């Protein structure tokens, strides 16, 4: 089983593989209407902790088969080991040429800079795996995601309907941007 070894660490955060035991904490993220309304069509809102456990089982099973830097990880606060969100890197549809960096935090963790701190560290790791650029996409009204992409160091590259069949703001980061 491939593991991101060692887990990534920042001053305040730990980024590690998801565990099925994280279902309740993950549900606080992916079951939240405030979070799920912005998720792509590929990720529907999770209805309850049991459904979240099933999602995590699928993520945990798929993780070893993904070619780095693709994957999904949990974000934990280092001081209390609480899961506060998730990160993923995946190939964007429809052509699966561009890697997307995405982040989701539970609402009570918003406003502390955790998403940008985790996103920068994940980008550094992805670049160490040979990726030359990462993209983030956000709906135009998702001002929090747009601000986070900019804080990560991502540059706005335009508006597109290329991904997910939605009108999205696209951001890009390259190694020299970090």
Image: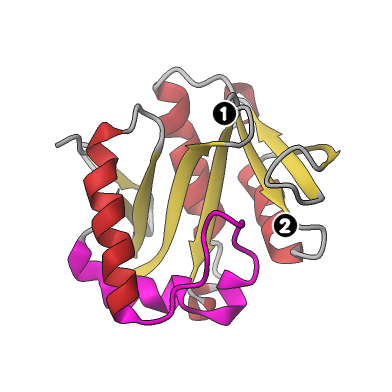
Q: Which quadrant of the figure has residue 79?
A: bottom left
Disc 1 on helix, strand or loop? loop
Numbered badge on residue 147: 2
Which residue is located at x 56 percent, y 62 percent? 113
Q: Horizontally, is 114 left or right of 66 in the view?
A: right
Which one is nearer the viewer's eye here, 17 or 9? 17
In front: 78, or 16?
A: 16
Question: On the picture, is 162 further left or further right than 46?
Answer: right
- Residue 111 horizontal/vertical position (percent): 60, 72
Where does label 1 land, which residue? 96
Q: Is residue 99 left or right of residue 5?
A: right
Q: Which residue is drawn at 44% across and 73% down?
A: 46
Judge by depth and name the residue closer to the eye, 104 or 51. 51
Residue visible at 19% across and 34% down?
A: 2
Residue 81, image quadrant: bottom left
Q: In which quarter of the image is the N terminus?
A: top left
Q: Position of residue 15 (x, y in %)?
A: 33, 51
Question: Dot 2 surroundings within 10 Å: few (below 14), some, or many (20 or more)?
Answer: few
* Real-space Cα separation, disc 1 to disc 2, in angstroms: 25 Å
Q: What stretch is highlighted in magenta?
A: 20-49
In the displayed structure, 128 sits above or below 164; it is above
Residue 148 visible to an observer of this rendering? yes
Image depth: mark 1 or mark 2 in front: 1
């Amino acid at each position: 089983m491939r593991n991101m070894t060692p887990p990534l660490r920042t001053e305040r955060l730990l980024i590690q593989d998801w565990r099925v035991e994280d279902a309740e904490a993950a549900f606080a993220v992916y079951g939240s209407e405030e979070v799920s309304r912005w998720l792509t069509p590929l990720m529907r809102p999770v209805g309850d902790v049991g459904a979240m456990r099933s999602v995590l089982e699928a993520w945990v099973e798929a993780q070893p088969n993904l070619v780095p830097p693709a994957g999904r990880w949990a974000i934990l606060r280092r001081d209390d080991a609480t899961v506060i969100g998730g990160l993923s890197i995946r190939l964007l549809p429809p052509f699966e040429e561009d890697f997307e960096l995405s982040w989701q935090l539970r609402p009570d963790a918003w406003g502390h800079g955790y998403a940008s701190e985790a996103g920068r560290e994940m980008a550094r790791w992805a670049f160490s795996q040979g990726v030359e650029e990462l993209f983030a996409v956000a709906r135009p009204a998702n001002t929090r995601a747009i601000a986070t992409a900019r804080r990560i160091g991502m540059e706005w590259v335009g508006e597109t309907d290329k991904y997910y069949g939605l009108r999205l703001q696209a951001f890009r980061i390259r190694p020299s941007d970090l």
